[in-house]
Image (cartoon, rainbow, N blue to C red):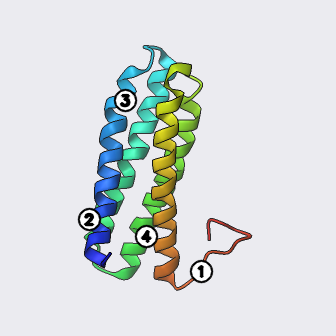
Amino acid sequence: MDNEEFKKMLKLRTFNLAREVMRFVDKFPNKRSAWIITDQLLRAIMSIGANIAEAQAASSKKDFINFLNYALKSGNETKFWLALAKDLDNKLISEIDEYLKETDEIVRIIGSSIATLKGKKKDKANPNF
């Protein structure tokens, strides 16, 4: 896969994930706790794709890496909110697990891209870098 195909793939995966979760959150119970969690979840998950788009329009390598870092952080935040959302409704756990898996894959891709751009290999003792 060349660089342009990779960029399109990553942008599409983050867009599709955000769109699916945006529709999914309407399944949660109408409770204050669910509203708070799903609101934060939507903000975090949409931020992944938004920062990927910003990175792809960056004017320098430094900006590109910075936006990828923001996307990585939003991905990790998304995983937190998805994990917490599992407590809201047991019937939704399998769907949440699918979104967690996709988010984790995207986070790994972004982390690997950052490491490659910085010219570093992942340190096994510190998987974040």
> Outermost residue, bottom direction?
119
Per the rendering, the mark at residue 8 is 2
CB of mark 3 within 8 Å of CB of mark 2?
A: no
Q: Nearer the viewer, mark 3 or mark 4?
A: 3
CB of mark 4 within 8 Å of CB of mark 2?
A: no
Cα gap from disc 1 to disc 3, whole angstroms: 36 Å
Q: Is residue 27 above or below residue 116?
A: above
Q: Is residue 63 left or right of residue 85?
A: left
Query: What's the residue type where badge 3 is placed?
Result: Phe
CB of mark 4 within 8 Å of CB of mark 1?
A: no
What residue does disc 1 label?
121
Query: What's the residue type where badge 1 is placed?
Result: Lys
Query: What's the residue type where badge 2 is placed?
Result: Lys
Q: Quadrant of the N terminus?
A: bottom left
Query: What's the residue type where badge 4 is placed?
Result: Asn
Mark 3 crowd level (few <14, some 14–19, many ≥20, 10 Å Cα): some
> Outermost residue, top direction?
30
Mark 2 or mark 1, earlier in chain: 2
Q: Nearer the viewer, mark 4 or mark 1?
A: 1
Q: Quadrant of the C terminus?
A: bottom right
